[in-house]
Every structure is written in C-alpha cells, then in structure tokens.
C-alpha cells in the first residue's frame, strides 16, 4: 500500500507531515510526501515563524512523478499553502490516484470558531470544491461550520449535529466531523455508507491540544490503508487520540509543541494488528 500525504512541514510543533509520516509509516504502509510549505513552527500560538510556500515547486515534482508512472492507493491532503494548491491537489488526485484508490481531504483551515492565519473566505469556497472530490473529509467543527456556511455554536450552545451533517453531506457524502464537545464527552460524528449518522465518543479533557486533527486523520488513513473498514478505523483512532490527549494533558507543559502521540503509538498498533 502506498499513501501520499500532502501537507506542510512545520519544523517544530508536531503537526502536519511530522505527525503523518511517523504515524502512517508505523501502520506498516509506505508514506510518500508532498510538502506544501516549510515553516519554522506551525502558525498556532507562535509569533515570528518563517513561511516558505512551495507552490512553485509542485509542478516540477509532479512532472518527475509522471515520468515514473507512480500510483497511490491513498491520497491524503491537509494544510495547503495557498488557494492555487487546491487546483494542484485536484490534478494530483486525477493523475496519480490508483483505480479504486481513496482520496481523503482534511480541510485544514481553522479551529475554535476561527480561520487560521493566512486563510480567507475565498480559500474556504475553493476547499469546498475540493471536498466534493473526496471519498472522505475530516473537518473539525470549525471547518465543518465554514464549509456548511453555518454559524459556529456559541459557548454552551448545543451543536446542531443533524443539520450540520446533512449540509456537509451535500458536499461530501462521507464526512467525519471531529471535536464536537457535549458536556463530559467529545465526539466524532460521521455518516456511514447508508447515510446514517454515527457517533464515536471519548472523555472530554479540558484544554487545547494542538495537532489533534492531524494525529486523528493520519491514523485514520493508516488504518484504512491497513484494510480496516471506516467504522473500525474511526473507533481505533478515537481511542488512540484520546489516550494521546490524556497523556499529553499530564506530561506536556506547552501545548504549542504538540501531542505526545509517540508514547501511545505502540498500543495503537497493537489494536490495529489485533
Ligand atoms: O494542525 C493544523 C496546522 C497545520 N499546519 C500549520 C498550522 C496548523 C494549525 O495551526 O499552522 C502550518
């Protein structure tokens, strides 16, 4: 199995490719990478970070790959450096996705009700189009609200899960919406192959845990590539992320530096192999 992970390299802060590559490789499948940007750190909570957009390099990379006749069983896209890259990713999917391969889009754009630095409403509109091409999308609640053009729920306000999933299903029929807090639990809502709403929940641990979405999405891709069905993959990944967050809440003093997912990988792999 060959996975292509399209994401940025944030040198410090454990997100994007520095999370995807170790997790997907550990699952026992090849993880090739297409870096979209090179940053000294991610943009969440650090100031003064460097940002080198790699858009201009991508067409040359693609040209070389074409000469090799490459095919990927899974193409997983995450943080994109600019709107132009959305078109490039769509072309890569059309050119390199194997027959019966799966295209998985994590529409990385924001969190806690806000877009990340450098993202605009025009980017959201283009990302919505990319999501229409995907087999699965993994927005967090913020990204789901932006994609669905619904307001982000105010603190204490219940999330209109049914309305949200139905609107998102009009974009991609197999959405997996992460990070929905309901009292003491945090849930993932997704639609199964029959369009039924399903939920996977874990204990809601207080705090903000940077890189959670990337850990979840990478583990999901790895589990699918290892032949797990979506329901099993979502269950295993929820357990993995929850254990990672529980450990990080105890051990990590500055959450900007990311989750201690390394310490939970072994248990995740045991469950994946079990
Ligand atoms: O984890 C999402 C993410 C990915 N890449 C970069 C980011 C963020 C979130 O802040 O800044 C560069």
Image (cartoon, grey):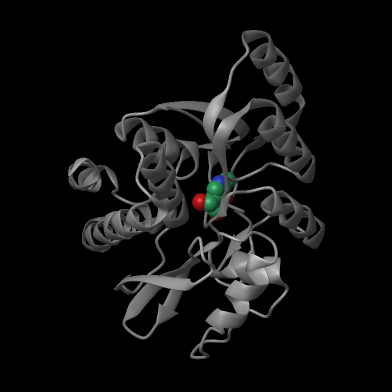
> Would you say 70 lies left or right of 150 here?
left
Residue drawn at x 48%, y 36% as measured from the top left: 17
Task: Name the residue furthest right.
Answer: 122
Q: Residue at x 73, y 15 (%)?
A: 63
The one of 164 and 259 positioned closer to us in this rendering: 164
Rendered residue at 38%/50% (across/down): 229
In the rendered image, residue 199, in percent from the top left (x then y), is placed at 40, 72
Q: Position of residue 145 (x, y in %)?
A: 64, 72
Q: Is residue 71 above or below residue 267?
A: above
Residue 28, can we see it?
yes
Quadrant (top left/top right/bottom left/bottom right) for the C terminus: top left
Question: From the viewer's perspective, is 225 left or right of 78?
Answer: left
Residue nearer the viewer, 221 or 98: 98
Q: Please state, as top left, top right, bottom left or bottom right, where the N terminus lies in the image.
A: top left
- Quick check: 90 above or below 207? above
Q: Quadrant of residue 60?
A: top right
Residue 5, x across and y down, in percent: 53, 34
Q: Is residue 30 above or below residue 38?
A: above
């Amino acid at each position: 199995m060959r996975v292509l992970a399209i994401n940025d390299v944030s040198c410090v802060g454990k997100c994007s490719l520095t999370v995807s590559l170790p997790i997907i490789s550990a699952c026992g499948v090849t993880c090739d990478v297409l870096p979209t940007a090179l940053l000294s750190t991610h943009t969440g909570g650090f100031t003064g970070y460097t940002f080198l957009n790699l858009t201009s390099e991508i067409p040359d990379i693609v040209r070389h790959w074409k000469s090799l006749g490459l095919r990927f069983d899974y193409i997983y896209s995450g943080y994109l450096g600019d709107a132009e890259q959305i078109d490039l990713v769509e072309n890569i999917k059309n050119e390199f996705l194997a027959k019966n391969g799966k295209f998985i889009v994590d529409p990385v754009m924001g969190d806690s009700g806000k877009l990340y630095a450098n993202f605009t409403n025009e980017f959201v509109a283009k990302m919505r189009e990319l999501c229409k091409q995907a087999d699965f999308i993994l927005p967090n609640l913020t990204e789901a609200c932006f994609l669905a053009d619904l307001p982000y729920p105010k603190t204490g306000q219940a999330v209109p899960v049914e309305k949200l999933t139905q609107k998102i299903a009009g974009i991609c029929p197999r959405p997996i919406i992460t990070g929905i807090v309901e009292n003491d639990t945090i849930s993932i809502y997704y639609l199964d192959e029959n369009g039924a709403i399903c939920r996977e929940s874990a204990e809601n641990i207080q705090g903000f845990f940077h890189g959670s979405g990337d850990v979840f999405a990478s583990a999901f891709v790895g589990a699918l590539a290892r032949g797990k069905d979506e329901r099993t993959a979502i269950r295993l990944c929820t357990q993995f992320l929850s254990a990672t967050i529980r450990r990080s809440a105890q051990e990590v003093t500055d959450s900007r530096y990311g989750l201690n997912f390394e310490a939970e990988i072994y248990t995740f792999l045991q469950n994946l192999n079990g």
